[in-house]
Image (cartoon, rainbow, N blue to C red):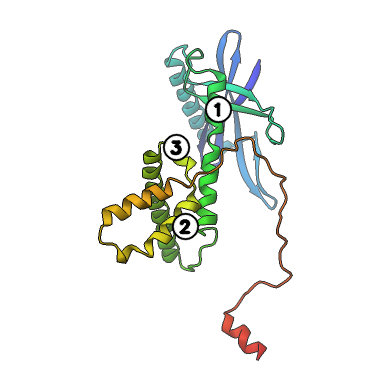
Amino acid sequence: MAQEKPVHEVRLGKVKAIIWRNETDNGTRFGLTFSRIYKTDKGWESSTSFDRDELPLLAKVADMAHTWIYQQAERGESKSDRQVRVRVTQRGFRTKEVIVDTTLLDETETMMSDLSNLYRQRWNAELNLRSIKNILQMDHLRCKTPERVRKEFYMHMLAYNLIRKVMAIAAKEAGVAPYQISVNGALQTLNNFLLSLNKQTDIEQWCRALINAIGTHRVADRPDRYEPRVRKRRPKPYPLMTKPRNDYKKSIQ
């Protein structure tokens, strides 16, 4: 019997039940473990023993876990998902094995290679987050109050979505996928075109020229690229700025 990862958790207060799915020769079986969490000087810990006053809560958690398992059994013998184990053999990649959980159950229609390729495309999400933090300089928010931080965050998201909208239009016109257009190139082109916006009489022609220019900024397709996990730039041996710049200037004079 091979025990898989937990599939569900039921918790009331400090009592919780962990439900496991076990695939056996006779089909799917579910197992449960009950525990109680408590706080000590070292932090949160768990125990499998319960006090007298915790037994009613334990009974409720057990009943809720039983209901969830019964609902899974009512769905029939057909599984609602399947797991695909993919071996990563690419040189330089840290991950050697990936388990992809999917609701695409037809193994003949959706092969393992299709799922692995689809999962690999999620790296584009990491690149998008890098564009937001580095290119749009959102890695450091400058406002101090929660209200202004929210406004700064929303303005970054608004600007990013507008740039992505223009990139999507440019990609469609160029006949390529949106992720093949460079965010940095699109932003630089947009800033250059904005300098001549007040001199234009034909806005439609200006927009077409902008879209065509953005469509020329392509990113290289390097799916197997890998880099050493080291930092190239070394930190400067200066203390952090902890007070206004004018105070430092006054102390220098």
Q: Position of residue 96 (x, y in %)?
A: 69, 30
Precedes in sequence: disc 3 or disc 1: 1
Q: Position of residue 30 (x, y in %)?
A: 56, 19
Which residue position holds label 3?
177
Q: Secondary structure at mark 2?
A: helix
Q: Is residue 30 left or right of residue 97?
A: left
Instruction: Out of 52 and 133, give the one closest to the viewer.
Output: 133
Instruction: Out of 193 and 234, give the one closest to the viewer.
Output: 193
Precedes in sequence: disc 1 or disc 2: 1
Question: In the picture, which quadrant includes the C terminus?
Answer: bottom right
Q: Secondary structure at mark 3?
A: loop
Q: How many marks?
A: 3
Q: Position of residue 65 (x, y in %)?
A: 50, 27
User: Within 10 angstroms of label 3, few (less than 14), some, or many (20 or more) residues?
Assistant: few
Which residue position holds label 2?
188
In the image, residue 145 sits, relative to residue 54, either above or below, namely: below
Q: Nearer the viewer, mark 3 or mark 1?
A: 3
